[in-house]
Amino acid sequence: MECREMVVLIHEWLDGETDELSNQRLQNHLKTCETCRQHLHELQRVVAFVQSASHIHVSSDFTARVLAKLPAPSKKTLFSSWLRNHPFLTAAAVFLVLMAGSVSANWYDRNDTLQVSSSELDKLKIDRERNVVVVPAGTQIDGDLVVRNGNVEVQGEVLGNVVAIEGKVFVASTAQVVGSTESIEAIVDWIWYEVKNIGNDLLPVLR
């Protein structure tokens, strides 16, 4: 029981927290107890080591030399680090992958029915047997004309773009198309067309 109390006193004495009476009790006990003297000696060695270590200074290139000896990070680690350091590019890449997947699904998940998109369908001649859409001579179409699963014959005037998906665009020599003409017959062209459309939709928002 006395040694347990003395161990507590030893720690307090090392911390400088004992009064004169407790200090006298401890010194008297240490004269007769080899175990407590050994315990005090070991604690004093630890304290001395910690105090001496606080004065140790490493060379200026210590960190660089330690890092040089570490194994090189794996490609997976480098890739993860790049993703964390470039969140905007990562988000953009994920967006493009998802969008390409969605666009590809739309390309393959289709039927062969002639589809026509225009704000002025009544001015067009639509031949569903031949899958041909004609802009008659002397006719003016305001806006874009998009035809899927068919060809487009422009004989009049289109104040916009003319696009044929899974088809071709034929423009007569006397016809006029204010925008561009596109014939999309491959999935790569289809993906690029959709990307351009999304970009054109986003531009007004980002300005």
Image: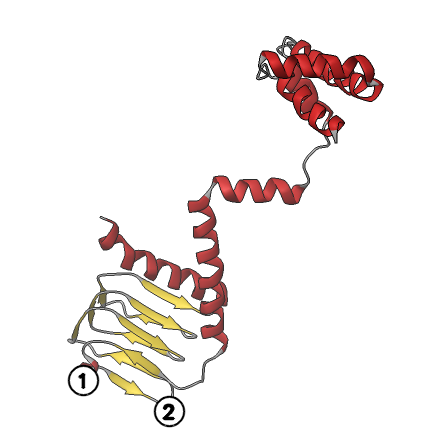
| Residue 16, horizontal then vertical, whole percent | 59, 14
Residue type of the residue flagged with mark 2:
Glu
Q: How is the image coloured?
A: secondary structure
Q: Residue at x 43, y 66 (%)?
A: 190
Quadrant in the rendering for residue 8: top right
Q: Identity of the amino acid at label 1?
A: Asp
Counting from the top left corner in percent of width and height, residue 53 is at 67, 12
Q: Secondary structure at mark 1?
A: helix
Residue 63, quarter of picture:
top right
Sequence-first tag of 1 and 2: 1
Q: Position of residue 141 (x, y in %)?
A: 18, 73
Q: Residue at x 42, y 60 (%)?
A: 192
Residue found at x 38% / y 87%: 130
Whole-Å distance between the Cαs marked 1 and 2? 18 Å
For this orientation, the residue located farthest to the right is 34
Quarter-wise, where is residue 46 in the image? top right
Quarter of the figure with the N terminus: top right
Numbered tag placed on residue 129 in the rendering: 2
Which residue is drawn at the image coordinates 70% and 11% (left, top)? Answer: 48
**Residue 23 place in picture, x, y as percent:** 64, 13
Q: How many marks?
A: 2
Q: Residue furthest bottom?
A: 129
Classify mark 2: helix, strand or loop. loop
Give the answer, above or below, for where 165 lies relative to 70. below
Crowding at label 2, few (<14), some or many (≥20) Cα neighbours within 10 Å? few
Residue 128 visible in the snapshot? yes
Residue position marked by numbered label 1 in the rendering: 122
Decide which of 178, 82 is in the foreground and name it: 82
Q: Is 15 placed left or right of 111 in the picture?
A: right
